[in-house]
Amino acid sequence: MTAADFRTIALSLEGVEEYSHAGLPAFRVGGRKFASLASQAAGYGNLMLTLEQQAAFVEEAPEIFLPIPGGWGKMGHTHIRLAAATEGVLAGALRTAWKRRVDKNAKTSRKKPHVAERSGITGRKRGRGPL
């Protein structure tokens, strides 16, 4: 697989948009990133997984998946070796990262607070007692 394949599969998932993150291609759903091509020059795509998902992918296919070195990898960020991946493996991995983000977005979504709540206006001036 290639970076172009990664992009095509990522953009085929519902609600996904590509954007530039630090000048490199990244993919988000619901305004939140789930994958990127930040390491494409080294032959990798990057996935944002849970630690459990990361461990399962690495255990099942260590020749394809590896934690991103350093702190990012300790948070579930995972490289996928594009040249070693089949279309099915790449699609499944991207779908897993996408679904994790969709589910996480659903858990954290809530109605936007009223304008007064967002601005801190609560019926009195800040730091000055009652109106």
Image (cartoon, rainbow, N blue to C red):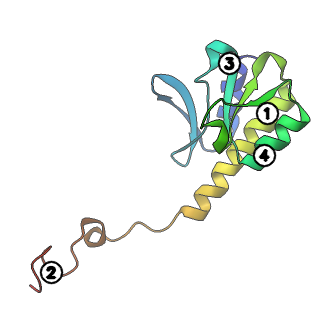
Name the outermost residue toward the front.
70
The residue sitting at 53% across, 63% down in the picture is 109
Question: Which mark, by number, is residue 1?
Answer: none
Rendering quarter of residue 81: top right
Spatial distance from mark 4 to mark 2, Cα to Cα? 48 Å
Name the outermost residue toward the bottom.
130
Please name the amino acid that badge 3 sits on: Ala
Which residue is disc 4 drawn over?
Answer: 53
Spatial distance from mark 3 to mark 2, Cα to Cα? 55 Å
Expressed as whole percent of the image width and height from the top left, the position of residue 61 reads 88, 31
Please name the amino acid that badge 4 sits on: Gln
Judge by depth and name the residue closer to the eye, 124 or 57.
57
- Asked which secondary structure carries label 3, the reply is helix
Q: Earlier in the sequence, mark 4 or mark 1?
A: 4
Classify 80 as above or below 14.
Answer: above
- Asked which secondary structure carries label 2, the reply is loop
Please name the amino acid that badge 2 sits on: Arg
Classify 39 as above or below 73.
Answer: above
Which residue is disc 1 drawn over?
Answer: 91
Judge by depth and name the residue closer to the eye, 38 or 89.
38
How many marks the image carries: the answer is 4
- Quarter holding the C terminus? bottom left
Which residue is disc 2 drawn over?
Answer: 124
Expressed as whole percent of the image width and height from the top left, the position of residue 72 reads 60, 37
Which residue is disc 3 drawn over?
Answer: 3
Q: Earlier in the sequence, mark 3 or mark 2?
A: 3
The residue sitting at 79% across, 33% down in the picture is 91
Check contact, mark 3 vs mark 1: CB within 8 A.
no
- Asked which secondary structure carries label 1, the reply is helix
- Quarter holding the N terminus? top right
Q: Residues within 10 Å of mark 3 (few under 14, many from 20)?
A: some
